[in-house]
Image (spheres, grey):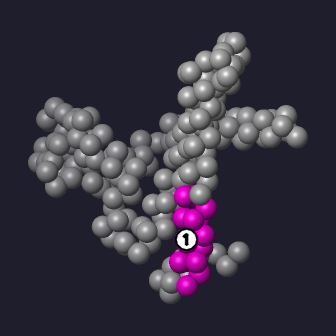
Amino acid sequence: MDIILKVVTYASGLVFVVAFGYKLLKYFTMPMHVRWELYPVPHEGKPYGGSFFEDVDYWKKTRHKDHMAQYMFMIPEILFIRALHEDNRALWYWSFPFHMGLYLCIGGLVFLFIGALLQIGGLEPNSSALASLAQALSQVLGVIGFILGTVGALGLLVKRSHDQGLIDQSAPI
């Protein structure tokens, strides 16, 4: 039974990595106009989030990108779903634990992979503090992530089935 659990765990991690790589490859092969011309455009450096293309004679000017502004915008948006928090707080209460659960499960998979590499390298959790730490972190992140993800998913299902504004956007299945 133990070997089956390990195989399923590593297979699920492999499926995730392959699917993510496929999506990433698909994203990078898309035409440029489909990718980033959405507002706000934080890397353009405009205080209101506007675009370089709004400037008069933009084609004559040198384009400057502020990558730090881009990261300062993206990190809170990705981790805390800031726009949903500001625009639809009732949906955010369920969406945030769902997404945070996903992030924690991914973190647990990363530490599980690190622990597997350490074991392949000959470091067992019983004899190595680093291997023990990787094992403990993978378990803690996995369990907390699973609980948060499940609570968020169930809350979103209930919200989507009872909120009149979301029923029209949700498939009955």
State the residue at coordinates (37%, 72%): 88
Q: Is residue 151 above or below residue 70?
A: below
Residue 164 lies in the magenta stretch: no
Q: Give the percent coordinates (x, y) of residue 139.
A: 62, 41
* Foreground of the two, 103 or 83: 103
Q: Is residue 162 above or below residue 96?
A: below
* Foreground of the two, 46 or 142: 142
Q: Give the percent coordinates (x, y) of residue 154.
A: 60, 70
- Tell me the residue that label 1 is attached to: 156
State the residue at coordinates (53%, 78%): 159
* Foreground of the two, 71 or 126: 126
State the residue at coordinates (61%, 45%): 142
Bin the neighbour count of mark 1 within 10 Å (Cα to Cα): few under 14, some 14-19, many 20 and up: some
Amino acid type at mark 1: Leu
Residue situated furthest front in the rendering = 126
Residue 156 lies in the magenta stretch: yes
- Please name the predominant secondary structure of the magenta segment in the image: helix
Q: Give the percent coordinates (x, y) of residue 122.
A: 70, 12
Q: Is residue 115 above or below residue 164?
A: above
Helix, strand or loop under label 1: helix
The magenta region covers 148-162
Quarter of the rendering occupied by the C terminus: bottom right
Q: With 166 as the anchor, is 139 left or right in this view?
A: right
